[in-house]
Image (cartoon, coloured by chain):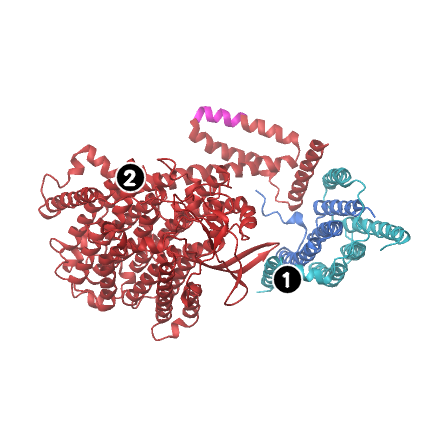
Chain colours: A blue, B red, C cyan
Amino acid sequence: MLLNEFLFLGAILFCIGVYGVIVRKNAVLVLMSIELILNSVNINLLAFSLRNGSADGQTFALYVIAVAAAEVGIGLALVLLVYRNSRSISLDDLSEMKG
Amino acid sequence: MFSATESAETVLRSGWFLENAWLIPLMPVIAFVLIIGFGKKMPMKGSEFGIASLVASLVVSVGAAYQWIQRVDGAEPESFVAPVIKTWTWWESAGFSFGIGQHIDGLSLTLLVVVTLISTLVEIYSVEYLRGDIRYTHFFGALTLFSAGMLNMVLAENMIQLILGWEIMGMCSFLLIGHWWEDGANSRAALKAFFTTRTGDIGLLVGTSVLFFAANAWTQKTLGISGFTVRGLSAWALSGDPGQAAITVGAVALFIACIGKSGQFPLHTWLPDAMAGPTPVSSLLHSSTMVVAGVYLVARLFPVFFTGMNILGTNLNLIVLIGGITIVVAAALAFVQADIKKVLAYSTVSQLGYMMMGLGAGAWMPAVFHIFTHAFFKACLFLCAGSVSHSASHHSFDMKKDMGGLRKFMPITFGAWIISTLALCGVFPFSGFFSKDEIIDNVGHNGYNLFMVLGLTGAFLTAAYMTRATYLTFNGKPRGAAAGAHAHDAHDAHDAHDAHASRGPHESRLLITIPLMILATLALGAGFLNPVPLGEKWERMTRWVEPRAEVISPTGISAVASGPGQGRVFIESRTQESKSESPCGTSTPTGGICVAPKLQHAPFKWSKALMSMLIVFFGGFASWVLCVQLYGKKNPKLVGLTKRNKALGTGYMFLQNKYYLDVLYEKIIVHGIAHPIAQAAYWFNQNIIDGVVNGFGLLARKISGWVYRNVDQRVVDGTVNGSAAAAQGAGAVIRPIQSGKVNQYGALLFGAAAIGALILVIINT
Amino acid sequence: MFSAELLIAQNIGFFIIAAVMVVGALRVVTTSNVVHAALWLVVVLAGAAAQYILLAAEFVAVTQVLVYIGAVMVLFLFGTMLTRARIGAESDLNNKNWFVGLGVALALLVAMLIALRDGFGAEKLPADDPLVSTQTLSDQIFGPYLLPFWALSFVLLAAVIGAIVLARRD
């Protein structure tokens, strides 16, 4: 198997995730797109871990999973708070930061 | 010459105290936890934990010092006495491991004894001084942790541990200086101290990193230890391995940290403001702990500075320059202060300048000895000032308004003050003479003639301003609060002594006077530990403390240390060496290492000593005459002279405003640099970044409109009005573009990444 | 260690899973139903777990299944339900400027694909290397990478506390 097969897969998933982050209006969907990005990173880490024969990549992949879990927890709590305050989770409505 | 094959093992004596010196900082840390946890419930509100732990630390320090002396005396004369080093792995991450442990040699033991002794005395003094204070327990907690930080820094085995202690001190100094934070001035002083030292601390981090990356390969290969270790860095600096650029950058960065911490010019401005804290804090901070940390760092890593600054090779380097300037600049400032503690603060700055200058000029031993003696007499002076304000002047420190004539009321305080003052001025049998005069002498001997003159000028000024302070405080007639007036109530917020303050000036209680007497005795006698004039037999400190510049074999390390965890003890073996000139310098012959450079001592001459004594007496005498005329007899020719004479008035204003350095920092640097950067960033954010998204056409049109109008307005209204209008106009025009939409920001982020990646791809193909 | 047939089988498996993942990911970012998006995300995550096994990282694969598919997805579904009155198709999920997203994503993809092709060309993954065992992994985590592990524990603690603080009603 080629290394690049995995790396290409990671790249494609990453770009789909980027597309989702930019295009989606719903906050929950944006969080899901971020999960896609994080998973593509994990695929890369594991591919290089196998290539270099070291466990470093796997260790970091585990850490990424843990950080992602924390991020989803906080992210959804924020979404919930926003929903409670404005009855909407559309990111277009959240433009109080408008200058 | 030496050869590595003929190494001979020497067995050095050791002992329990030396092996377990790491307990010294540990005990105050435990006491700190106990104070914070249970202090309020204890009969003495937590102070007993602090005092007990420091007494225990003092006992261990003294025991270790005694065993170190035996170790040195038991070794062959003039041979290198290996420090007692122990390390345990503190933490490790991704292959780097960071140790924690002890590096016990003469230098660290000197400081350990001084710090534990003065901390103990200061805590005893504080029991009385802060009786009834609202944050009494917290005060003792912070004070104990502060001592622990300093002790940890002093026996640090590596730079990471040293930084730990350094930062603990920074944090505790913030807490202690701002102890009475209800007063806005105090919390501002605390912040100022914190930020100023932080400015320097950047240098510590940068310097440590630079030196680590430069030295680690060499130290790992040669010694098998990391490039953070004090021992590794010292050996590396003298090995001839380091490139001049790397070690110079590292040394300069570290020295910037020392400038900040030790209050050297131009970062000395925080130190007098730090007098806002309670007097015991000032006494501890400014005699033996915080401000000495910078000097200690230079002394500890002296080989690094030796090579990095090319100390014996030139007659001008950064350390000696900063030290020399600091001596005179700070001493001049001490003349215009009305606050007794500020006089002492500037005096501290000036004395630290002596230490730095001594280190910078290669007078290592006199500088270290000056740290030792200065700690005693300066702590004593501060505690005397505290005693005066506590018992005589109703918590005021203003010499001109609230003191005077206290000699009769406070004989013990006055006696301690006089002894310490004489020591500070460097009058013959007192301790300051044996250290300060040696610094000046050796600086001249090593070829830094200009700085010897600066040192003598400093001695003259020191004698003069201390005479002025003594005159104002203890002579003449009582004024203001000392005379019984209760006009001021600035300090009432934290005044718990109204009951006995109304009795008028009187001697302080025993808990205050006993530390004073102990310190005064030491200020009188400590000099005889290293009295150069009496001949080499008397120079005990030199024998015990100064590391011998001898080539030692790098092999023969690693044994398992006793105690918790896996530690290592380093056993040095001597290499045979001829009796001729020691080869330790900036390039040690391969096969051996040096941890101290070869330094020379100036031969003592009574003629030179007499000259400096004359200068001191002249300074004191001139100042006394002036004070009698100005403050005592109110001679009309002198009173108000600064207002009548323009040149003198300008000089006085210049000093009163502390050379306008504070203005420079706050008004010009902070406002002048930080604000425009913030504004420029804001402008960039507002105008450029958001503009890109919504189309280049729109942006180009609006920017051109903006430029047209604002350039026009600038021409018309001048720069000041124009820039204000520019910001306003730009904001009004381009505000709609700032969308606040998260998706757009995401698009920008990834778009920029994509463009950057494409550029890199194109460049690389 | 691996025979040629097995390698071919692995390749085929990889491509099937990869295709499913790409389709799933595209559906996640295009579907008009939030619950469907979450279910498509499950497909992608499961596919990722399968790829991890192909990459000889069983422990990470199992963790992926437990943490992502088990816990994170439940969180997502809860989040969806708590913040939306109705579950079903919705027309208003995308921005109007979808073309910006497409442009950026494609530019990034092109850049990465070129860089990867130039960088690793036809480099093969080692097929007969000793695998990184779970024991090695634990030695790594509790040895040299202990400090990041601690930091991570603090992150998780902070996240837990933060989530509670943010989401509680008062």
- Residue B586, position as x, y percentages in the image: 44, 41
Dot 2 alpha-carbon crowd within 10 angstroms: few under 14, some 14 to 19, many 20 or more: many
Q: Which residue is mark 2?
A: B444
Identify which amino acid the numbered label 2 is placed on.
Gly
Left or right: B485, with A23 as reference point:
left
Q: Is residue B481 left or right of residue A78?
A: left
The amino acid pointed to by label 1 is: Phe
Q: Residue at x 41, y 38 (%)?
A: B310
In the picture, measured across the screen, residue A83 lies left or right of residue B101, that is: right
Is B672 colored magenta in this rendering? no
At which x and y percent is residue B159?
48, 52
Q: Quadrant of residue B50?
A: bottom left
Residue located beneath label 1 in the image: C142
Stretch in magenta: B708-717
Q: Which structural element holds mark 2? A: helix
Q: Nearer the viewer, mark 2 or mark 1?
A: 2
The chain holding disc 1 is C
Whole-percent x and y of residue B417? 20, 56
Q: Is residue B715 within the magenta segment?
A: yes
